[in-house]
Amino acid sequence: MALSLPSRLRLLQGTQTTHLLSIPTHPQLAFYLCQQRVEIHKLRQGENLILGFSIGGGIDQDPSQNPFSEDKTDKGIYVTRVSEGGPAEIAGLQIGDKIMQVNGWDMTMVTHDQARKRLTKRSEEVVRLLVTRQSLQKAVQQSMLS
């Protein structure tokens, strides 16, 4: 998907909001430019609330095993699987998305178990994620170079 990017752009698409923010334009900062909000409504199956995705990563995990970390040092929380037709796929979550926040809570320096617990809280039927996505980051990088 090729995007022509003005200095500020906000795309609305269902429950997803993409923010491409205007900050000093340097290619190494592209990672921080793109944030996508994804709102997932959990599916109730008996006693369980289903999100329909799996995560990997965390500060207690080996980042060299993370297939989504380009430099193999990133200890962030990443989406590793999305169930076809599940709540996460319907909301627009994608494999490789890096989870930055869950319902306003910072997820950049958490263990794998802390992330899992934050995502699966029984008291929350809706999970609002702030994610970064490499395809968005690359589009911003390309726009900064042109």
Image (spheres, rainbow, N blue to C red):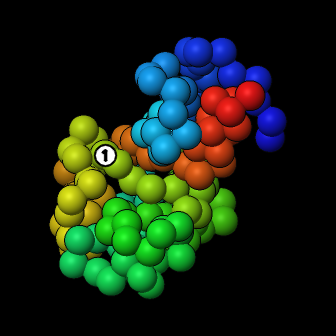
Q: Quadrant of residue 50?
A: bottom left
User: Which quarter of the figure is the N terminus placed in?
Assistant: top right
Q: Quadrant of residue 116?
A: bottom left
Determine the residue positioned at 26% across, 64% down. Answer: 115
Number of numbered discs present?
Answer: 1
46 or 78, which lies in front?
78
Residue 19 screen position, x and y as percent: 51, 27
Residue 104 screen position, x and y as percent: 24, 38
81 or 26, which lies in front?
26
Residue 117 visible in rendering: no
- Dot 1: element: strand
Give above or below for 25 relative to 98.
above
Give above or below for 100 relative to 73.
above
User: Which quarter of the figure is the C terminus placed in?
Assistant: top right
Determine the residue positioned at 34% across, 63% down. Answer: 76
Q: Residues within 10 Å of mark 1 (few under 14, many from 20)?
A: some
Give above or below for 141 relative to 107.
above
Left or right for 138, reference 77: right
* Residue at image mark 1: 101
Q: Mark 1 is on which residue type? A: Gln
Give above or below for 34 relative to 89.
above
Determine the residue positioned at 42% across, 82% down. Answer: 64
Residue 38 screen position, x and y as percent: 48, 41
Left or right for 74, reference 35: left
